[in-house]
Amino acid sequence: MKRNKILIIIGAVLTLALIAIVVYLLLTVSRQQQELAEAQLTNEQLQDNLTMAGELAELNAQFEQHENDAIRLENDTILAKYNAAKQRVEELIAELNSQKVKSAEQIQKLRDEIATLRGLLRHYVAQVDSLSRENAMLRDENTEIRNRNEQLTSTVNDITRKNDELNTRMTLAEKLNVTGLSLTALNKKGKNEKNVTKATQLMVTFTIPQNNSTPVGTKTIYLRITGPEGSLLGNGGSFSFEGQTLTCTAKKTIDYSGDEIAGINIYWDVNATLNPGDYTVELFADNFRLISRHFTLKK
């Protein structure tokens, strides 16, 4: 009887010990499974971190690739959006590096934000391409307009030049023509004098041919005679020519009707002994130099 009690006690002890061992083993297995699950989760998070780090680095490189495009466009609105998105990428990179392990919620939030930034980049690139095309079209239009303006300018300049030439020809056509100009020394009897030192008068003779382009009316013809020394002979008054005031030797007024006037004479009385040599005779009228000739008077 006593022996049976002992066996019962031993059996109970062994049973308790077995139960304790089983419980211990179960707890150990459970703890190991939890640790394994935690380790697996940590590895997955680290892998997610590495994946997102790579995505952020790639995204950052893409932003930098288009940075020059943003600056060249000189569009403040697009550039501001671009800088804000690029700054956010850099902040996410710093945040990812500062915290190695994140919760599933944090990882999903990061993934969503990366997706948003990718969408912003695509939108930005589309805007850049659109503006680049518009700028290219504007440059082409500006080039075309500039070419047209240059053509118009060239045409206007050509027409202006032709008009100037036409006006010049028309103006020249209005000028009195002079032919048969001569310079003769006269003595006190009004006869030709071969020795210029004995001359008492100089006579300039010329003819005005018919010219229907010249306005008719009273014409004052101014004579200038320059002696061998280069000084002007006489002082017959002054007249205007090409914005200057010139002194003349003598002058004569005629009535011009468009028909030829032959044998016009203008005289100048010699007031000092003339020297032999080359004399220059010029006639002016209506702000034109009608003619200029050189004559040699001998002793």
Image: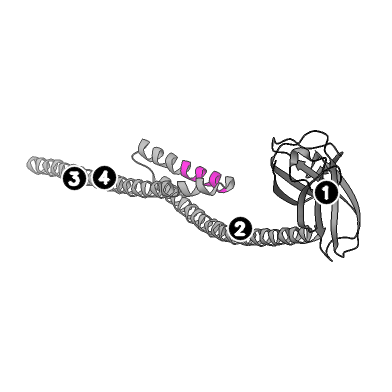
Find disc 3 in the rendering and name its residue. 25
Q: Position of residue 185 (x, y in %)?
A: 78, 45
Disc 4 residue type (three-letter) = Ala
Asked if the magenta segment contains residue 158, the reply would be: no
The residue lying toward the viewer, choosing from 55 and 121, is: 121
Q: Secondary structure at mark 1?
A: loop
Looking at the image, is mark 2 or mark 3 earlier in the sequence? 3
- Magenta highlight on residue 84: yes
**Mark 2 in CB contact with mark 4 (< 8 angstroms):** no
Instruction: Label 3: state its secondary structure.
Output: helix
Q: For mark 1, does the 10 Å Cα neighbourhood hold few (<14), some (14 to 19), or many (20 or more) residues?
A: few
Q: Is residue 167 above or below residue 72?
A: below
User: Which mark is on residue 39?
Assistant: 4
Numbered tag placed on residue 191 in the rendering: 1
Mark 2 and mark 1 lie on one chain; the one further toward the N terminus is: 2
**Screen quadrant of the C terminus:** top right
Mark 4, residues whose alpha carbon is within 10 Å: few (<14), some, or many (≥20)?
Answer: few
Write down the region rendered in magenta.
78-87
For marks 4 and 1 on the same chain, the one whose residue lies earlier in the sequence: 4
Snapshot quadrant of residue 46: top left
**Residue 245's quadrant in the figure?**
top right
Say which residue appears at 51% left-offset and 47% top-offset.
72
| Residue type (three-letter) at the residue carrying disc 1 | Lys
The spot of residue 208 in percent (x, y) is: 82, 59
